[in-house]
Amino acid sequence: MYTAEERQREARRVTLVGSLLDFTLGIAKIITGVFSYSHALIADGIHSLSDLATDFMVILILRMAHQEPDQDHPYGHARFETLGTVMLGGLLIAVAGAMAYDSVGLMLSGEALKTPTWPALVVAAVSIVSKEWIYRYTLAAGKRLKSDLIIANAWHSRTDAFSSVVVLFGVGGAMLGAPWLDALTAVLVALLVAKIGWDLTWKSVKELVDTALPEEEVRELEQAVMEVDGVISVHSLKSRLMGGQSLLEMHIQVDSHLSASEGHYIGDTVVRRLKSRFDNIEQIIFHIDTYNDDSQLFCNTLPLRDEVEQALQSAVDQINPSLRWEELMLHYVNARIELELKVDSFSLKECELSGVELQSRLREALKQHYWFSQLRLWLAPAHG
C-alpha cells in the first residue's frame, strides 16, 4: 500500500522517463523526416513532441491530486486526477480526429509526394519498439499505483506507437507503389485511439458524478461486513470513487442492548476488516444502528432521555417520593423504549417495598405512555 508521497514520487519518475523518450524520438523523427522526404514521419515527430505537453500536465495534476486535505478540500484533492484523466481522454479523441482528418484528406487529394527513403523506415521501427516499451512500463506503474491518470497517459504513449505503425506501413507502401495504404491504416488506427480515449473519459466522468461501485463489488463488501462478529445487518451502503479509490458510507446494525462503546468498536472492526481485505478503499464512514432504520418499524417521534426521566420520576413519586433510583439505561427497540432501572436497595427497604412489587407498579404507571415497552429493575447494593 503506497502512501500519497510514495505514489507521487513514483508517478513523477515514470512520467519523466516518458518525457525524455518523447523528446528524443520527436527530434529524431523530425530531422530524419526532413532528410528522408517523409511528411508522415515529420508529423509523427510533432505528435511525439506534443506528448511532452501532456507529460508535464500529468506531473502538475498529480502534484495537485496528492496534496493533503485542507480547509477548502477536506476530502483531499484526488478529483484533480479524475479531471486530468477526462482532459487526457479528450486529448486522445482530438488526436484521433486529427489523424483521421489528415488521412482522409490525403486519400481524397490525389497529391503526389516524393518517395521516402529507407532511414524513415528505421526510425519508425525504433519508435514503435520504444513507445511500446514506455506504454507497458507506464501502464504497469499506473495499475500498481491505481492511477487512472497514469494509465491514460500510458495509452497516450501507445497512440504514438500506433502512429509510428501508420508511418511504417505508409512509408513501406509508398516505396512499394501503394501510397493509399498509409491513409487507410491511419484511419483505422484513429478509430482505435478514439475508442481508448472515449473509454477513459467516460469512466472518469462517471466518477465525477459519484457513480456507485458495480453491484457485484457492493455485494462482496456487504458480505465482508456481515462476517464481523456482532453485526446483525448492513444497510444504506453508499459507494463512490475518488481518484480511483473507493469511499464508502454504511449503516451497521448491532444488538440494541450493547453499550455505545461496544457498538462503535464493532464498527471500527468492520473498517479494519474491509481495509485489510480491499486495498482500494480510501475512507469508510459508518453509522451504528440498534435497529434497521430503513424498515417500517422505525419511529422518529420517540422521546429523548429528559422526557423519559421526567415520566419515570413522576411514576416513582406516585409510589413513594422518598424512593431513590441511581441509574437509567434506555434501549430504543422496535419503535418503542425499553428501560433498565437501577434502584438503591437501602432506599427500597426504607420505603418498605420489594423489588418485584416496585417493578410491577412502575410498569403499570408507565404503560400509559405510547413509547413504553418494558422495564427491568436492578437493585444496587446498599451504601455504607
Image (cartoon, rainbow, N blue to C red):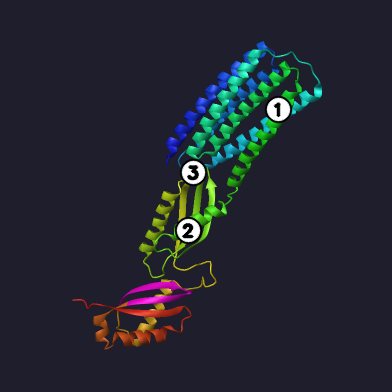
Cβ atoms under marks 2 and 1 closer than 8 Å: no
Residue at 50% x, 26% y: name it: 16
Cβ atoms under marks 3 and 2 closer than 8 Å: no
Which quadrant is the N terminus positioned in? Answer: top left
Q: Residues within 10 Å of mark 2 (few under 14, many from 20)?
A: few
Name the one closer to the observer, 120 or 281. 120
Q: Relative to 59, is 115 on the left or the right? A: right
Name the mark nearer the viewer: 3 or 2. Answer: 2
From the image, tell me which residue sits under label 2: 223
From the image, tell me which residue sits under label 1: 186
In percent of width and height, residue 240 lies at: 54, 50
Q: Residues within 10 Å of mark 3 (few under 14, many from 20)?
A: some
Q: Is residue 104 above or below residue 115?
A: below
Task: State which quadrant residue 25 falls in.
Answer: top right
Between the residue at mark 2 and the residue at mark 1, the CA separation in whole angstroms equals 49 Å
Which quadrant is the C terminus positioned in? Answer: bottom left
Name the one closer to the observer, 140 or 380. 140
Cβ atoms under marks 1 and 3 closer than 8 Å: no
| Label at residue 369 | none
Counting every numbered tag in the picture gives: 3
Type of amino acid under label 1: Ala
Task: State which quadrant residue 328 falls in.
Answer: bottom left
**Sequence order check, earlier mark of 1 and 3:** 3
Residue at disc 1, secondary structure: helix
From the image, tell me which residue sits under label 3: 76
Type of amino acid under label 2: Gln
**Sequence order check, earlier mark of 3 and 2:** 3
Residue at disc 3, secondary structure: loop
Q: Relative to 320, is 171 on the left or the right? A: right
Residue at 53% x, 31% y: name it: 136
The magenta segment: 325-341
Q: Residue furthest left?
A: 384
